[in-house]
Amino acid sequence: MEGAGEVSAAAGNGNGSARRPSTAPSARVSILESVRACGVWGKEVEKAELRRQVVMPLHLRRAVAAAVAAKDEAAGVAAAAAAEEQGEGEKEEGPTVAPVVVFVNSRSGGRHGPELKVRLHELITEEQVFDLSVVKPSDFVHYGLSCLERLADQGDNCAKAARENMRIVVAGGDGTVGWMLGCLSDLYKMKREPVPPTGIIPLGTGNDLARSFGWGGSFPFGWRSAVKRYLSKAATGPVCRLDSWQTVIQMPEGEIEELPYALKKVDPADRLEISQENGSELPEKASCYKGVFYNYLSIGMDAQVAYGFHHLRDEKPYLAQGPVANKLIYAGYSCTQGWFCTPCTASPQLRGLKNILRLYIKKANCSEWEQVQMPSSVRSLVVLNLYNYGSGRHPWGDLKPEYLEKKGFVEAHSDDGLLEIFGLKEGWHASFVMAELIKAKHIAQAAAIKFEMRGGEWNRAYVQMDGEPWKQPLIQELSTVLEINKVPYHSLMINGDQ
């Protein structure tokens, strides 16, 4: 499952092999390059040619839509039969090069979602576009794809080709893309490969996953024309691999309130499976949660700022009208939460993560945990999988070979089985790091990570995974353990940088 053959098979039509995404040497990219990356300029794509590439035959479109709506693959099979009886479907339209199904997060991108959805309906039909406020990605995986598989088993060659060549596009931010990738990963567990690769229309604030795989960092101004190029890239772009990382949180007691999409509570039946995967026994009375991230996990002040922003967006959605407004709100929260200036009422020593957290790592090809000393000044700890972080910044940096050798690091890639761990001290330090005037505080590079947290003077910590924050309860006497291990299979991404 690790080889390039897997990726070529997952690409379906074999038009691309696995390769690492290209990465710019600096976050200070010109406006011209940003515009080009967003797909505003480039070869015009004719609507008829686009539909030939990405639109499924009518009987398959109706089958998938009906199966998802009814949450029953049998309903989809019946819809396909009804369409064929009416003389519609594959006889008129023929097989598709690479069917593309689009999922739109209408809450992302300054509320561009509804307009984008209408445009997509015009280009590739309503049945291949799903609104995430109505349809969950898991419903598509469990019912829509199952319907195609069932039709294929009944001898429908068009259904077989559509299932094998299927590609997904997510119109949303990093959190939305992660949600989709997590649901697609269930196909590995159910042995229902190939897994469709995923492309991105960037509608979020940071869009670091989109940047890392060549889809641009923002929703373009000329988006009506750009949407056609996004879809064409999704159908023809090469497929590359992305490491996925499972996070397991063990709490001695209590519950996480306001659980984000990134996490779910572990059922009693799944506890043994997690214990076997992580090589540790879960206490019987402990609360346990698990989730998967693809870009980053962070603990500390940056997660606290993100938590405040998400609550404001939910309570006052009219304030979050686009990436620029969102970033201004983030900046305001950074100031009010004490990242730039610790309030006089609190001891500065209590603001350092060292007071509540112990860090352990496993290095590559090593089975033993090794404790890593936390710098006392670090107030935000980031675990990074991608090159991009914080709207296209590169806090880990392009490290010279001599420095890598001195620190015992290797060059970082998104499919190398390693995570980079760095720290941010306070708002001023973070600002200089994000401006790439200085490097972040390099702490470690690891194949597995474990955090042990105790409350002490704190009764909570703030954590976020891929932009989805939550408030983590802490207890003074007992440790809350957060453990990160690599998922044994790769997520598949479409490289839009072509």
Image (tube, helix red, strand yellow):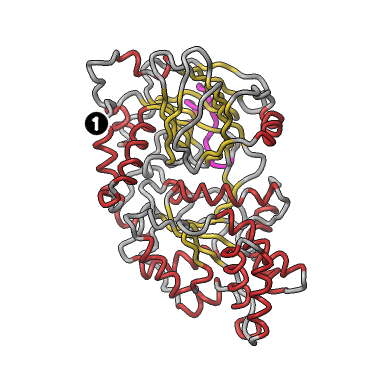
Query: Left or right: 220 with respect to 149?
Result: left
Q: Is residue 195 magenta?
A: no
Where does the image place residue 171, in percent across and percent down from the top left?
Answer: 44, 58
In this picture, is 276 found above or below 128? above
Query: Left or right: 341 with respect to 386?
Result: left
**Segment tinted magenta in the rendering:** 402-415
Residue at numbered disc 1: 335
Circle 1: is it few (<14), some (14-19), or many (20+) Cα within 10 Å?
some
Rendered residue at 43%/34% (across/down) = 470
Q: For residue 64, what is the image quadrant? A: bottom right
Secondary structure beneath dot 1 equals helix
Visible residue check, residue 497: no
Where does the image place residue 361, in percent across and percent down from the top left?
Answer: 57, 23
Visible residue check, residue 186: yes
Rendered residue at 34%/40% (across/down) = 311
Number of numbered discs visible in the structure rendering: 1
Rendered residue at 67%/52% (across/down) = 187
Q: What's under tag 1, amino acid-wise? A: Cys
Residue nearest the observer in this picture, 456 or 490: 456
Q: Is residue 404 magenta?
A: yes
Q: For residue 145, what is the image quadrant? A: bottom right
In this picture, is 79 found above or below 107? below
Residue nearest the observer in this picture, 228 or 101: 101
Residue nearest the observer in this picture, 159 or 423: 159
Where does the image place residue 6, in percent across and percent down from the top left?
Answer: 69, 53
Rendered residue at 55%/29% (across/down) = 249
